[in-house]
Amino acid sequence: MRDTLTAPPARTQVPIRHLAGPDALDRALIEQLLERAASFEHGSEMKAAPLLGRLLATVFYEPSTRTRFSFEAAMHRLGGQVLSAENASRASSAAKGESLEDAIQVIGGYADAIVLRHPDVGAAERAARVAPVAVINAGDGRGHHPTQALLDLYTIKKELGRLDHLRVGLAGDLRNGRTVRSLALLLSRFPGNELVLISPRALRMGEDVIGALNQAQQGMQETSDLGGAIADLDVLYQTRIQAERFESPEEYERLRSVYVVSAELMRRLPEHAILMHPLPRREEIDPLVDADPRAAYFRQARNGLWVRMAVLDWAVAH
Ligand code: CP
């Protein structure tokens, strides 16, 4: 009789679909995933259970609300089940000194895909090199957050009707904010977009992303003047100053309130434009702004469900 516990999984005939960073996402795949996400949102795929009998491991070495819950909800809604380490740095054998590579090889023997959040830049790529199943990057330190960028694009398309010929302001902590780093690169896959990188000098976008944008001949400008940039934007994408990435608490205190989107500032944002934020927020958007119909950030967070259903379906069901 065949030993179903020790027999190697029959997964190796097809290439594993990792999503370790934005390089995995060309325009065709982005459009495919956004279309699939829309079909999940509009209910045309909801009756099927394409991931019935499949297991997802969510392995989070850093805190999360949106990314972990939306991936787990997505897996359940697709008919699959979830194994979760929500505090893996303390509650997994990482606390005993186990390497990421060893942990991923072991977890990959139990699950059909791994969603990984880790404080080290490049952790998802390291994991993908050794994993026997798909690895999806849910944020690697100040590196990238590709599924956040996908749900950001989904939100822009839904709210404004297109992903090209847009003027998008990315504001706040561009040095440490992985969501804006990934989003800038994905926006450069679409023609005619203009990026306005709005940050204090100390929090400028990294040279690696600037270099890739230049390589893609992406139109962009840099400024520290949020008030001056806001009036001709289609999207203002505000971000949190990432306290957890600062070595000096004094530097964080100096920069934490550098940009605050208030109801008064919103008067300068065009009527057709939207205000986005990956969340969580602190003081950088006044809660009084939430009632403004252009404030899209809670709708944006909700869109993560549909987009992560599409990503799991793509990575696991093929
Ligand atoms: N936007 C985002 O990644 O949120 P979480 O840290 O709550 O997952």
Image: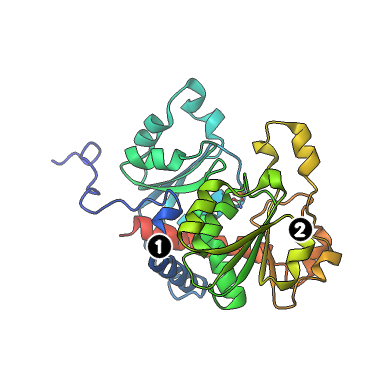
Instruction: Mark 1: give few (<14), some (14-19) or many (20+) Cα within 10 Å.
Output: few
Q: Residues within 10 Å of mark 2 (few under 14, many from 20)?
A: some
Query: For the point 80% across and 40% down, which residue is it?
Result: 254
User: Which residue lies at the image location 56% right of the left edge and 35% below the top edge?
Assistant: 87
Query: What x and y, as percent, mark residue 155?
Result: 58, 68
> Which residue is rendered at x = 23% and y = 36% of the image?
6
Q: Considering the image in quadrants, where does the N terminus appear?
A: top left
Marking on residue 130: none
Percent x, y of residue 234: 66, 72
Residue type, numbered disc 1? Asp
Q: What is the three-letter code of the residue carrying label 2?
A: Asp
Mark 2 C-beta to ligand 1 under 8 Å: no
Nearest to the observer: residue 17 or residue 72:
17
- When the figure is inspected, residue 281 is found, relative to residue 271, above or below; the finding is above
> In this orientation, does residue 279 appear?
yes
Assign a secondary structure to mark 1: loop
Contact flag, marks 2 and 1 (Cβ < 8 Å): no
Mark positioned earlier in the residue sequence (2 or 1): 1
Q: Residue furthest top?
A: 96
- Residue 16 location (% of width, % of height): 30, 51
| Residue at x 70%, y 47% (from the top left corner) | 201
Mark toward the viewer: 2 or 1: 2
- For mark 2, what is the residue? 225
Q: CA distance from mark 2 to mark 1?
A: 32 Å
**Mark 1, residue position:** 26
148 lies left or right of 215: right
